[in-house]
Image: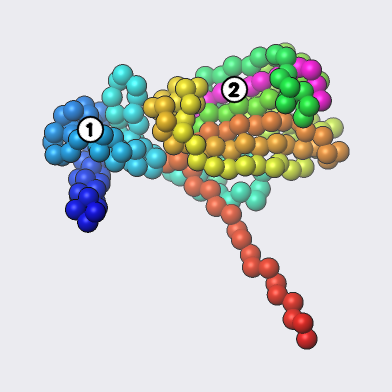
Amino acid sequence: MLKTGILSNRLHVQLGELIAKTNPGERLPTEPKLAKMLGVSRATLREAMRTFETQGLIQRRQGVGTFVVHPSSVIDTGLELLESIESMALRVGLPVRMGDYEIEQRPADAEEREVLKDANVLQASRVMEAEGRPIAYLVDMLPSKLFTEIEFRRDFSGSVLDLLLKQGNLRVTSADTEIHASAAESNEARALHMQRGDVVLHFKSTLFAVDGSVIDLSRSYFLPGYFRFHVIRRVEPRHSNH
């Protein structure tokens, strides 16, 4: 067990030094060559590389290779405030833009029909990019009664939240969000230029209007190296019995 731990630490140090010496955008040696250089199996190497990928230091592209990326800025933010990626990125001076996107109106599935109270949904799927690479994949499902597809396309620039906040009659008030790390499925992996099974931060949110109605079902997948989320937690005041 001790030898395994020493090997793992040595591998991470050596791999970290190699990544640090490689310029952003350059490709690392192939997995077979790198495994031979470092004296480990490809399976062991792949596990070590997954750690650096999660940190946002490398990017593996299926069938192309592994590239070094050094984020110039990390979006470090609390989760108490509901805000868009654009707003968060603006605070740290990280320019972001909408990359590939798809907007479609389609029939709601059973869960969407029950929650959104509409037979049809307007779905917006898009990739957000920074420094020439994808950093988030966002999917929102809204009741079709809120916008026509033409209206939505006309005013949409990447943030569904910002678009909703501009609608004075909606008054978005809160979001109920589940947060967990998950293995990227094919759609997320393709959008974020990752391998299937690589770890992403997954936010599953339900947005509410002031009247309690649900106006958005949001699924967000964040590249961990570019995002650092935190929550302020307080101790419950203790009441004396005397």
Q: What residue type is labelled 1?
A: Arg
Residue 123 appears at what percent x and percent y?
66, 20
- Count the labels in the image: 2
Tell me if residue 50 comes above or below residue 194 in the rendering. below
Residue nearer the viewer, 64 or 163 = 64
What secondary structure is marked by label 2?
Answer: strand
Q: Nearer the viewer, mark 2 or mark 1?
A: 1
Which quarter of the rendered picture does the N terminus lie within? Answer: bottom left
Q: Which amino acid is tagged 2?
A: Ser
Relative to 240, is 79 on the left or the right?
left
Q: Please, which colouring scheme is shown?
A: rainbow
9 falls in the magenta region: no
How far across and how far down the image is residue 28, in percent?
23, 31
Please identify the quadrant where the C terminus is shown.
bottom right
Res 143 visible: no
- Around disc 1, counting alpha carbons within 10 Å, would you say few (fewer than 14), some (14 to 19), or many (20 or more)? some
Q: State the residue position of label 2.
A: 125
Judged from the image, the secondary structure of the residue bearing numbered disc 1 is: helix
Asked whether residue 8 appears in the rendered view, the answer is yes
Which is nearer the N-term, disc 2 or disc 1? 1
CA distance separating discs 2 and 1: 35 Å
Secondary structure that dominates the magenta span: strand
Closer to us: 231 or 25? 231
Find the magenta span and give its range. Answer: 117-129
Q: Which residue does the image show at 70% across and 13% down from the upper left?
A: 106
Contact flag, marks 2 and 1 (Cβ < 8 Å): no
Q: Which mark is residue 42?
A: 1
Looking at the image, which residue sits at the far bottom? 242
Query: x%, y% of residue 223?
Result: 46, 36
Any mark on residue 64, and which? none
Q: Which residue is drawn at 57% across and 29% down?
A: 138
Residue at 62% across / 42% down in the picture?
A: 178
